[in-house]
Image: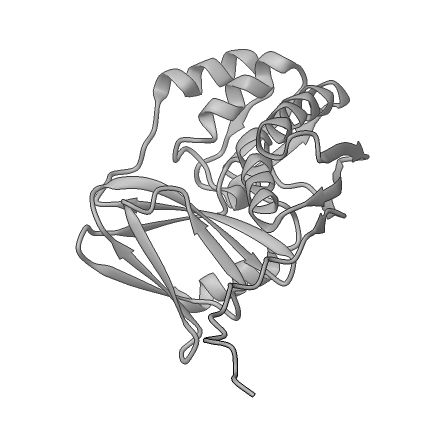
Amino acid sequence: MRALLLVFIVALATPARAWPVDWVHDVEAGKERFVRLPHVDWWEVEDPKVLQVEWLADSNELLLSGLKAGRTVVLLGSEGKVAAWRVRVGQPPLRDEKLAAAAQKACPDLKWTPLDDVKLTVTAHAEPCRLALHALFQTDAVEARGLELTVSGEVLQAQLKALQRAFEGVAKGKVKARYVGAGLVLTGKVTQAEHRKVLWEVLRQSLGRFALDDQLEVEPAAAPATDAGPPTKR
């Protein structure tokens, strides 16, 4: 399993992440799980009360420690690329038949093939379909590797508006976004904290995998203040 995870994260790390998540992991409350990865530069846990994450450099493993029952998402960055995992701590898979039925109604060509590698094929052709898929993809109905998604120009424009509203909330007009083809281009100058928030919003507001051209200029983090001690007497 660890070897499969390693191949998966390397092979699919280039596109940006959006709903659904790349991978789902299960951990019991009070227990741990080790996931071997080639490298991780940073990570953030959506709900740190549910899960603690630690990087073990000696063994190139990410340690997932379940703190209490719940569900959370982990955003991971490595060499400028981003991945998203959902971690269930003592929780069963979340599926919602009503959301699945709503997506089927809003997206007429939606097709489930549970026994195939591609488990869901769908075209997001209009805004009602995008919204229905956005809700469905936040459940455990499908993971990113099992999705084949086509997005229309109309839906990309609606998604761009949602992204711009979200970026305004976390970066106060510092971020400009546009699509070039199906690729999302981000420009502006932000702090490191704002940059992470922008990446979270890309996940939360978007559907499927897409190319991300992250041209944001990230201001270096301020160095911590040091106590130089009393002045030297001469």
Where is residue 22 drawn, in percent x and y?
A: 50, 47
- What is the number of callouts on the image? 0
Single out the residue that lies furthest toward the right: 180
Q: Tell me which corner region of the image, top left, top right, bottom left or bottom right, holds residue 188.
A: top right
- Which residue is found at the position 70% from the left and 30% from the top? 173
Instruction: Please say which color scheme the image uses.
Output: one colour
Q: Quadrant of the C terminus?
A: bottom right
Single out the residue that lies furthest toward the left: 30
Establish if 72 lies above or below 151: below
- Which residue is found at the position 53% from the left and 23% from the top? 133
Establish if 214 lies above or below 1: above
Where is residue 11 drawn, in percent x and y?
A: 60, 60
- Which residue is found at the position 63% from the left and 55% from the top? 81
Where is residue 83 drawn, in percent x and y?
A: 54, 51
Q: Quadrant of the N terminus?
A: bottom left
Q: Viewed as shown, does residue 60 lie left or right of 165?
A: left
Q: Viewed as shown, does residue 65 lie left or right of 227?
A: left
Q: Is residue 18 visible?
A: no
Q: Viewed as shown, does residue 121 lie left or right of 35?
A: right
Q: Is residue 11 visible?
A: yes
Single out the residue that lies furthest toward the front: 234
Where is residue 44 drawn, in percent x and y?
A: 45, 50
Establish if 96 lies above or below 38: above
Q: Tell me which corner region of the image, top left, top right, bottom left or bottom right, holds residue 31.
A: bottom left
Q: Nearer the viewer, residue 168 or 6?
A: 168
Establish if 141 lies above or below 125: below
- Which residue is found at the position 53% from the left and 59% from the top? 9
